[in-house]
Amino acid sequence: MTIGGYDAFDDPYSYRGTDVLKNRLGTRDPEILQAFELEMSALRADEPLPTGRYGPAHYRAIHRHLFQDIYSWAGRYRTVRTAKGGNWFCFPEHIDHQMTVLFRKLDAAPFKPGADFGAFAAAAAEFMGDLNAIHPFREGNGRSQLSFFHLVALRAGHPIALARVNPRTFMPAMIASFDGVLAPLVAEITSLRA
């Protein structure tokens, strides 16, 4: 079954017989849910993001913050297998381990204050590509990735302007990163430098 562009199987997150995710509004109309999700997550994004230690728990707290008004499972890893465009994301039984391994990379030199921006952009593109391939949540991965990346960039001393993200170029760059092609994502990150 394809749900919101995702392939999911035996999806307990959706209302039976629909491709609409169960939500706090209780709507089964996909357009109403999409509008509600965008509005509520944007409002939460305007609030201060949760602080933390830049690990998986911090990342889950950001997802919970952004989507708490929409989904009861906000901040929890997905329990179903999903794919998009024929590309499978990390199977749920491996998400916790893969997140722990990935987030250790944030201790590397390119993410430290004072690191060269080029090194930061390259490391950030690899990190974001890997995080996208894990795709730990049933919905809201992209917004969580960008919000967390904003915090990582600030900590590294390389603030970015999220308002300049262009979905028409950023999304294809993220998709290319799934196949290990990182140059477009490095270019997108570079274009966001504040």
Image (cartoon, rainbow, N blue to C red):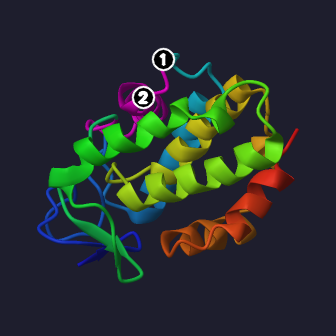
Identify the residue under disc 1: 52
On the image, the x and y values in percent for residue 169 come to 73, 70
Instruction: Please state, as top left, top right, bottom left or bottom right, where the C terminus lies in the image.
Output: top right
Q: Residue at x 72, y 43 (%)?
A: 120
Magenta-drawn stretch contains 64: yes
Instruction: Please state, as top left, top right, bottom left or bottom right, where the N terminus lies in the image.
Output: bottom left
Q: Residue at x 73, y 59 (%)?
A: 186
Q: Residue furthest right?
A: 194
Q: Residues within 10 Å of mark 2 (few under 14, many from 20)?
A: some
**How many numbered circles are shown?**
2
Left or right: where does residue 163 sit relative to residue 1?
right
Q: Residue at x 53, y 59 (%)?
A: 129
Identify the residue under disc 2: 55
Name the secondary structure under disc 1.
loop
Amino acid carrying label 1: it is Gly
Viewer-closest of 162 and 124: 124
Region in magenta: 53-74
Q: Are marks 2 and 1 in contact (CB under 8 Å)?
A: yes
Task: Say if residue 25 shows up in the picture.
Answer: no
